[in-house]
Image: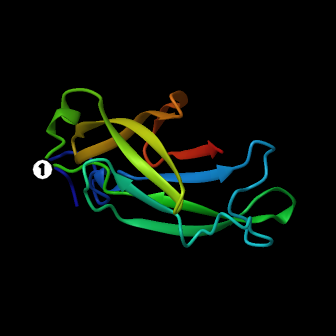
Amino acid sequence: TACGRGGPDCTEGGRIDLSSIQLTFKTRNGDYLYPKQNPLPSYNIDSLRVSSADGRSIPQRKGLLTGPFATEYYVYAFGGIYDPNIDVSALSGEKCNDYFIRYNASDTDTLRLCYRVTEGECGLYFEATKAYYQNQLILHKQGAAPVIDIVK
């Protein structure tokens, strides 16, 4: 179907549904924090949770990927970052939100994610622009549905 009369083909519509990010966790020596085989005793992928600083419920999921040397490891994704009811400022500029990462009962971190939403001919489009972890810039100008490496 066409987005507008004589307009572009918009069968996929806007990409606001991609207001999500994927997190990969590594140790400082480069090992995966959540490997499938031989998991670290204090880190269980089933205990990992991400919550928004404002208390919004956010959809979350985990997945299994294969890395170098056939190492299987878990990644964690969460979405629903853009909420059209409260994030209207993202249409006129960059918006930043804080998210709390809970690894286990005694270990938490904060991730700050900045993004913007643009209006195109076929709807709204999400673009992650920056991410900060431990006050360090770890992502800059990535685009939709970025993958962020957290080094713990």
Q: Which amino acid does label 1 sit on?
A: Asn
Residue indicated by mark 1: 85
> Which residue is painted at 29% across and 28% down in the image?
94
* Image position of 47 (left or right of 8): right
* Image position of 40 (left or right of 136): right
Q: What element carries label 1?
A: loop
Percent x, y of residue 129 = 42, 32
Say if 42 sits above or below 18 in the image.
Answer: below
Percent x, y of residue 114 = 37, 34
Considering depth in this image, is 72 or 17 the residue closer to the camera?
72
> Which residue is painted at 27% across and 51% down in the image?
14
The number of numbered discs placed on residues in the rendered structure image is 1
Q: In which quarter of the image is the N terminus?
A: bottom left
Colour logic: rainbow
Q: Residues within 10 Å of mark 1 (few under 14, many from 20)?
A: few
Q: In which quarter of the image is the C terminus?
A: top right
Quadrant of the rendered structure where residue 45 is? bottom right
Say if 82 sits above or below 46 in the image.
Answer: above
Percent x, y of residue 67 = 76, 58
> Which residue is painted at 33% across and 43% down in the image?
126
> Which residue is painted at 82% across and 56% down in the image?
68
Considering depth in this image, is 80 or 36 the residue closer to the camera?
36
